[in-house]
Amino acid sequence: MSYSPFSDKYNQVPQSEDGEGLLSNPEPTYKPASRRNGTIWYILSLPIVSLLSVGFGIWIGSRFVADPAKLCPSYVQHYSPILNDIDTSYQPVMFNGSFMKENAFRLKAGPEVDAAWGSLGVHYRSFALPASEAEKSGLTSAHVQINEKYGGGFPVNLEGLHHLHCLNLVRQSLYYNYDYYHDQGKGAFVNDDNIVQYHVSHCLDIIRQQLMCQVDTGVLGQVWWDKSKPQAFVDFNTEHQCKNFDAIRQWAEERQLPAGGPPDFLQRPKESDVLESIP
């Protein structure tokens, strides 16, 4: 056995008698100092390996992982066929939050304001949803279907355009607009006042639920106004992340079913699929 001043243990070395040890297979030498050196190199290499792993992960993510802005819509809303056809990623949009300066959508009842709201697609007809996409879109065989002789599928509407339809009806029902639309007797106002009331309250509650579901967690700051006597007022002009509404509206416009349709356009329902009252 031998002792090294650089080790706190004795190191075993091969023994030899009459030179025979040079020809035999000696037992291995144990050198704790060498193991300690290997451990040091292992520890020193860990940060390098970690950095390389992180860099590789970032490279993989940049090349093969979808843009989060494009991926997000598929996770925060129910499936829709429109997700396959257009870019529904979010883009920054500055809201017009003016309090005193009105725009075309805020005017009193008349042709100009009606044209503005009409341009949003609030009167669009249904489009045909292929039967293959019905289940993942939330529909069942009990929903109304199109006769196979006319292509089959399901007549559906985009929910977002229905929300705008509802907001438009609430606008029409404001006290300073109601008489104008009631006297015209068009759209929702072809019905008697009792049904109009149900329609408006339905729309109001749909908007309530939608706003609560997609609650905006942004904040509203305040600005100063009135040079002679400065006062604080809420600044409603804020930036938001929005989908491309025009692309969505155009998609729905291009896929509208023909107006009017033959009497047998819809497939006759099974008796078990018919509800006893309006849901």
Image (cartoon, rainbow, N blue to C red):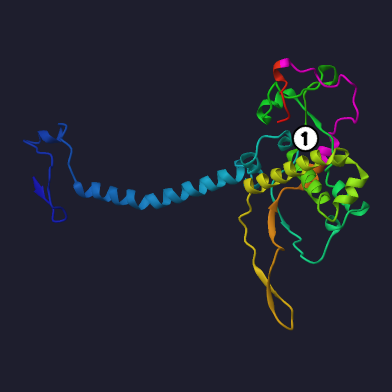
Q: Tell me the SS state at disc 1.
A: loop
Residue 201 visible: yes
Is 51 positioned to the left or the right of 133 in the image? Answer: left
In the rendered image, the quadrant that contains the C terminus is top right
In the rendered image, the quadrant that contains the N terminus is top left
Measured from the top left, where is residue 147 in percent x and y?
A: 82, 19
Residue sitting at x 73%, y 21%: 274
Decide which of 179, 89 is in the foreground and name it: 179
- Predominant SS of the magenta segment: loop
Circle 1 residue: 157
Residue sitting at x 89%, y 30%: 258
Magenta residues span: 250-271
Measured from the top left, where is residue 61 in percent x and y?
A: 57, 44
Name the image quarter holding residue 84.
Answer: top right
Q: Is residue 270 magenta?
A: yes
Is 133 positioned to the left or the right of 40 in the image? Answer: right
Decide which of 133, 58 is in the foreground and name it: 133
Decide which of 19, 9 is in the foreground and name it: 9
